[in-house]
Every structure is written in C-alpha cells, then in structure tokens.
Image (cartoon, coloured by chain):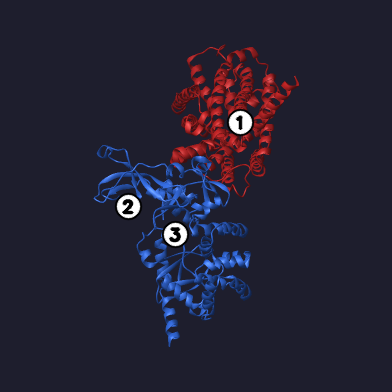
Chain colours: A red, B blue
Amino acid sequence: MKHIFSGIKSRLFLFLAVFGPATITAMADNDASGVATYSIAGAKLGYPILFILFITTILLAVTQEMGMRLAVVTRKGLGDLIREQFGIKTSFFIFLSLLVANMGTIIVDVAAIKTTSSMLHLPIIPSIVFILALSILFIIKGNYKTNQNIMLVSCLFYFAYIFSAIKSNPNWGDAASNLLVPHGVSFTPSYWKDYIVIGMGVLGTTITPWGQFFISSFSYDKKIDLKKLKYSQFETYWGAFLTNFFSFFMVVATAATLYFHAIPLVSGEQAALAIKPFAGDLAGTLFAVGILNAGFMGIVTVSLSTAYAFSEFFGLSGSLDASFQKSKVFYAIFIFQLVVAGIIVLFPFISLFKLVIATQALNAMTLPFIFYYLIKLTSNKKVMGEHRNSAFQTYFAIGSTILILFASIYTLIITLFNL
Amino acid sequence: MLYFSELLNKKVITEKQQELGTLTDVLFLYEEEPKVVKIVVKTSHPSHLNVPSLTIPITNLVKLNTHIIVHEDYESLPPIEQEMSVSEYLLDKQIIDLVGNEMLRVNDVVIQDSPYYYISGVEIGALGILRRLGVEKQFTKALQFININLSPQLLSWGDIQNIELGQGVIQLKQREEKISKLHAEDLANYLEKTNIKNAAKLLKVLDKKKSADIIENLNITYQDELFHALKPDRAASFIDVMEPDDAVDILLTFSQEKRNDILELVTPRQQKKLKHLLGLSKTPVGHALTSEFVTVLSDATVQDVFKTLRDETNEFSRLSTLYVVNEKQQLVGVFNLHELILQKPDTPVYKFMIQDPIVIHLTTPIEIVINKLFKYKLAALPVLDKNKEILGIVTMDDMGDFVLKKNT
C-alpha cells in the first residue's frame, strides 16, 4: 500500500516538474481577444457553439502536443527547425507574418484593457501604461522560474469566469449536452452562417500561430528531459482541457444571460457590463477583472513568442534566463511591440475594428503554413527518430489543417464582402 | 575571400561557354583545415547531360567571376563519405562559439580562395542575413543615412564547433589535438581572445616549432604579456626555434635584465646569431620614420578609398601601399595600389586585403628592417606601437640612403 502511494507521489512530482509550458500557453490562448470572442459566441449563438469548443479542444491538444514533442525531442524550437530545414527565405516570410499577426493580437489585447478599465471606472491612460510597464518589468527582471510562477498564479484569475457563470443560473444539462450535439435552438440558415463565422473565430482565437511557436520555445527554455516526454504530453492535453474548461464558462455565462434574453452585444468587452442585470454586479466586475488579467497574459505571451521566434530564426541568443545585456535584441523586440501597441491604442489613427478583422484573417492564413511545417517536421524520421508522428496523428493534423484552411477562406470572404 | 551566398546560384559554364547549370552546394572535408573539394551543380538542361546534377572537383575550376568557369573536359565524381555539404551541415545550422561559449547560427560561410579554396570561418551577423535575402546593398546604404555602419561578424573555423557534427555524426578529435593542426595565424587569433594562463597551458601541449609560429603571429602586446607569464627557460625554448629576426624583435621589448636571463638559456648557435643582431647598429628606426602613409577602415569601399587617396595624398612623394585599420585604429591588413585597381568600386576593403601584414617596431634594428624589406620584397614596412597602432612607415628608399651612408 505504502509502495503504491510513493509510486503515485513520485509520478505526481515528475508531472509537476514538467508542468508549465503547455498550461501557460493554453491559458494565454484565452487572452482578452479570446474572452471577447467567447462572449460574443455565447451571446449570439447560445449553448450550441459549445460543440465547436469541444472540437477545438481536441485540435488544440493534438497540435500543441506536436509542438511540444518537437522541442523536447530535438532540443530546438520550431523557428530553429524551420530555419535549418527550409532555409532563410522561408524563415523570413514566416517570421514577418507572425510579427504582423502578433502585433495585431497585442493591439487587440491592449484595446481590451482600455475598454475594460473604462468600464471599471479606472483612469484609462495610467492603467494601460501601468500594465505595459508591468509586463516589461516582469520579463526583464524575472527569470524563467519566477515568470512561470507569476503566470501560473495569474491563471487563477480565470476562476472569475466560473463564478460569473454560476451566478448567471444556466441550464447546466443543456450546456453539457451541447458539447456533443448542437441542439435546442432553431437552426435557420442565417444562424448557420453566424455559427460558421463565429465558430471560426473561436477556433482562430484558441489555435494560433504564436501558440505553436510559444509552446515549442517555452518547452525548450524549460529544458525538459526526453525521459519525461510522457508527462509533458499529459500536461499538453491537460492544458488544452483547462483552457477550454474556462472558455466553457465564458460561453455559458453569456449564453445563459444575453442569448437567453436576446440582448445584442456589439463588442466582447461589453459582456462584463451586459451580464450585470442578470448575474449581478459582482459577476460583472469579476468578468471585467478577468479580461484585464487576460489582457496582461496575452500581451506578455504573444510578444514573448515573437521575440522567441526572432531569436530562433535569426540566431541571436534569446532566453528568459539570459541577462538583459546579452539578449538585447530579444528584449528590444519584446518592448518594441508593447510600445507600438500602446501608441496605436492610445492614439487611434487606425480603425481598431478593421485591425481586429485583419488580425484574425492573417492569423487564420498563417496557421495552415505553420501547420504544414510542423507536420512535415514532426513526421520526419531524420528529425524526430522514434518519436515521429504516428500515421493517425499525421492524417488527423492534415485533415484539421485542410478544414481550418477552408473555414478561414470562407470566413474571410464573408467578412470582406459583407455577405 | 568569398561568401558562400555569392557562389550560390551562380551560373556554371565550361571554357567554351557551354552552360552546365547553377551552383547549389559546395563540398568540403571536415577537418582542421576544411578544404573545399567539390562543387555541386544543378544542371539546367538535364536531358542534354543526362544527369540532374554534377559534382565537379574544385581542381577543374578555371576561373570564378560573374560565372563559374570549369575545364572543357571537366569530371563529375560522386561525393565520398568524408565530404560534407555546406548547405547540409553548416549554412543555417547552429554552431558553438568556443571562445564566447555560446550558441550561434551560421548566416553565411566564408571561403578563402588562396592559396587554395578552404573554409576559413562563418558569418554570424545581420549582414549575413541581409546578403542571403539579397538586400545587403540597399540596407547598408539606408542605414548609412542614419549613421549606422554594419560590419561583418566573422568567426574563424578554429573558434567554432558544429553541434550536429560534434554530436556524433563525425567524431571530433581531442580539442588540443584539433587545435594543434590549425593555421598558426588562426590559432594566434584564438589565443588573443583567451587569457594568458590558458594560452600558456595550450602552448605547453604543442610542439616547440608550432608554438613559435603561433607566438610570431600574436600581436606585440600579447607577446609581451605571454612572455612575461612564461618562465625564462620556457621563453628561451621558444626563442630557440624562432626566426632570429623575429626573436630579436621580441627580445628588444624586454628589459635588459630579463633579456639577458633568457639569452643565457638559449642554445649557443641561436645565441650567437641573436647577440650579433642585438649588437648591430643601435640606430633606432625612429630616425627613418615617415608619416607619408594612408590608412583606411576595413569596411570602406574601393570608391571610398579612391576618395581618400584624392583628398589626402596630394603632397605625397610616393605611395605604394595602403594600410587597413579597425575602429580602434589598430592595423588589421594591407594592400597595394595594383590590388586596389583590380577591384570593383563597391567592394569593401576587407574582402581583398592581406590579413597578416609584416610589421616592425620602434625597437627593431635597422639591419633587421632591411632584411625584412628584402625578404618579403616590400616597398615599405609599418612601424607599430604596443597597441598595434601605426606610428609611421619605413620605406625602401629611406633604407637605401642608410645603406649608402654606411658604406661610405
């Protein structure tokens, strides 16, 4: 008996040792723009959109696992491998589209902080400057370990959504059964159109190009031992589950209140305000605090993923454990993105709405390319050895990529031509 | 000096202008001195030649300018096991910088074309990336507008280790053994970047002749430091195997006392030569020094050099050699007017300069200066101070005067 217990204990310890990268990446997938998307999805489509969330979880788990495995097996990041196997021109164009798409995501996150802080009656400019400065300090001063711990603690804020959901008195049975089969609403053609477009948004905000780079770089930075691969794999699946566990409550909170009462939602952040009459002031405030925190997570992880990718593609040393002086370029890229995002949001000379659309489109278009390289690399025997993809993993990933490609083209056409 | 990226996709033709294809790769031998052995050519008309690619030995190469020209009756030999491909094992791969002890990525590969083709090092800087993307010129020009000058960041072969190859694809020899087979100049470069203690340790494992070669290649400040770190008997054993001219040069940088200590321990034959040389004219070179010389920065272009010549050398009575300095004004290279004229206007100086100039010091006796001028067939020699900065030059003309005076 004692034996069994110590076995479990040592296994738990091993899991905790590899714990981090996947959970953080997955949680950061629920950045402020993510929260906004889920809120709109719940408010406009009700429980049936949870079905898409379920599929997204599986897709996220499979793709994140590939990125993690790639880094642990090869001791290199995704950027490193693309550069080595596909040359400098491919690297340059992938990096460029990643940079632009990430820039867009960060701007959207900062913008969400702006709207939310005004809803919470916080002074706008100081709040934005404070959060940006905090992010910069956090990355420059911290090392890998403290940063990871702060991020993990920050993940706890997502419990705010569970609370908001409970306060909104949902029909839990309907919500759960909709995970497997969409039902309970009238499926008109216009509903289906919204369903695909918003479903695509849900997919796009959860499975992102930066997420693919971040998981591999962060796993690499954590120096996970190959012998612990199994535990890391488990962590990736756990992370994918966790991210959409919280997304589930975001959708439920808005579906039970706003969809049920047919309250239209112009922007995702407004959900915090809109659910107040139905779920109470506290739920609304918690929802808003959750968005602020999600904004912070998004800003840090997305800009960090650009910096990681840059150092991997172009060979300049970059790691959270390196000193500021040594990784100047790494930090410069990180800070540059935050400053640009801050300026654009504070002095909006570009239409933010157009920017969000453009960002989502670019993310969706970059993703199939990144998957292409990811699948190619993880299926390559020379690179992965015995840890290469199984036939099922390869075909599943190829199938998903094609699905995402078509869905993103469809969404793009609908959005561009206002169909 | 050439960059691999400049060779890549160049047209390969035969002497009679028959087009074979484009260069896609270069094969080299992975050893202490990585000689380039073959070029890989993707054929442009596969049906013509019946093969998709050719592997032509570098010995069949006739000329290399806008096109790569190979012998009319070129051979195509299949690659053998020891031959490694630049694009597969070097370009875009990670290397370990043995000196800085960090991982870096190879952005370009530096190939020396004389006395034969070999890989001398890798480019790790931003310029390499820009060159690969084909925007090097545009970018450097744009950056010059805002006063930023990018210079190439090169690591020599001795300073790097390929990770993939180090991981067992090919077994590397012991580090010391590997080092002992490097070029003396490369090793000297390497030593200058480590501390004296390490250097002295390393010199211990090498044979005397090699050590002496390396010491001769060190800069004078470093030589000075190194010899101070060595015990007299060890110093003497190096002096023993050095060229007498160079040995005297080093000995003269020591105090009279230490010099005598070392001399006592040198073998009688060498001692006799050295004493003779030391006892020669005490006329310091300072008397013969002229300031009629031109220095240019290593990243200046040929065009810049012409401008400098027009602006600064109006009053010169004679000019044959130009000296290349780095930002700290230290001498790093040399070239003559003929070599200059052969270059294209936008070629930077570091691409064609000779990297290990023959130099003398203020303490060098005039007889040795004359010996060196004759031995290396030079028109002038630069006189360096302890920081490797040029104090002036001594010309053959001035030495001629000296010889005449002495004889009358």
Q: Quadrant of the N terminus of chain A?
A: top right
Residue A419: image quadrant is: top left
Circle 2 is placed at which residue position? B66
Side (left or right) of B66 relative to A272: left
x and y percentages locating residue A334 in the rendered image: 58, 42
Determine the secondary structure under disc 2. Answer: loop
- How would you rate the neighbour count of disc 2 (Cα within 10 Å): few for under 14, some for 14-19, many for 20 or more? few
Circle 3 is placed at which residue position? B350
The residue most toward the left is B16
* Of residues A361 and A4, the one drawn nearer to the viewer in this rendering: A4
Circle 1 is placed at which residue position? A227
Q: Give amino acid for label 1.
A: Lys
Q: Give amino acid for label 3.
A: Tyr
User: Relative to B405, is A269 above or below?
Assistant: above
Q: Give amino acid for label 2.
A: Thr
Determine the secondary structure under disc 3. Answer: helix
Nearer to us: label 1 or label 2: 1
Give the mark nearer the N terminus: 2 vs 3: 2
Disc 2 and disc 3 in contact, CB within 8 angstroms: no
Q: Chain of mark 3?
A: B
